[in-house]
Amino acid sequence: MGRLFAGTPFDRPPTCERCGQPESACTCPPPVVEPTRIPPGDQTARLKVEKRPKGKVVTIVSGLDPLGNDLAELAAKLKGRCGAGGTVKEGAIEIQGDHLAAAEAALKGIGYKTSRS
Ligand SMILES: [Zn+2]
């Protein structure tokens, strides 16, 4: 019975489409999936200043798709421009302190449309 499938395509191990090696021997790097970024000019960043308990004030940038934007990189840029700390939280960027004008200028400089809410 062992020869039932011998010589048919079905007994061959699956091969890599790129290098032709059996998948067990393939050393191809996994395909890189580039996230789809949305051009800044097609997006509107919503800015607001929020007062938190204990008198803390944060500037919040929201309305930007977390998959369409590199929010971590954008947060780093905004922190640099505002000279303040900040974080990305639930798809929004929080900058410590009232930096509405600086954050808006930085976003406009990158090409985003902005609105104050
Ligand atoms: Zn391969």
Image (cartoon, rainbow, N blue to C red):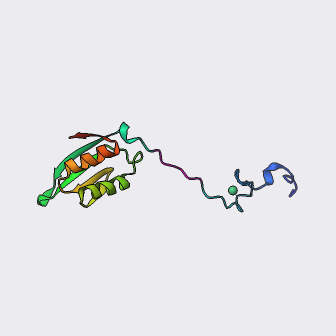
Residue 110 vs 25, above or below: the answer is: above
**Displayed quadrant of residue 81:** bottom left
Name the residue rendered at 25%, 46% in the picture. Answer: 105
Name the residue rendered at 17%, 53% in the picture. Answer: 98
Q: Position of residue 46 (x, y in %)?
A: 26, 42
What secondary structure predominates along the stretch shown in magenta? loop
Residue 104 vs 21, above or below: the answer is: above
Quadrant for ligand 1?
bottom right
**Displayed quadrant of residue 40:** top left
Residue that lies at the very extreme toward the left in this rendered image: 55
Residue that lies at the very extreme toward the front in this rendered image: 109
The quadrant in which the C terminus is found is: top left
Q: Position of residue 115 (x, y in %)?
A: 24, 39
Closer to us: 61 or 23: 61
Name the residue rendered at 32%, 52% in the picture. Answer: 90
**Displayed quadrant of residue 63:** top left
Closer to us: 4 or 74: 74
The quadrant in which the N terminus is found is: bottom right
Count the numbered circles shown.
Answer: 0
Magenta region: which residues? Answer: 31-36
Q: Is residue 62 left or right of residue 25?
A: left
Q: Position of residue 57 (x, y in %)?
A: 16, 55
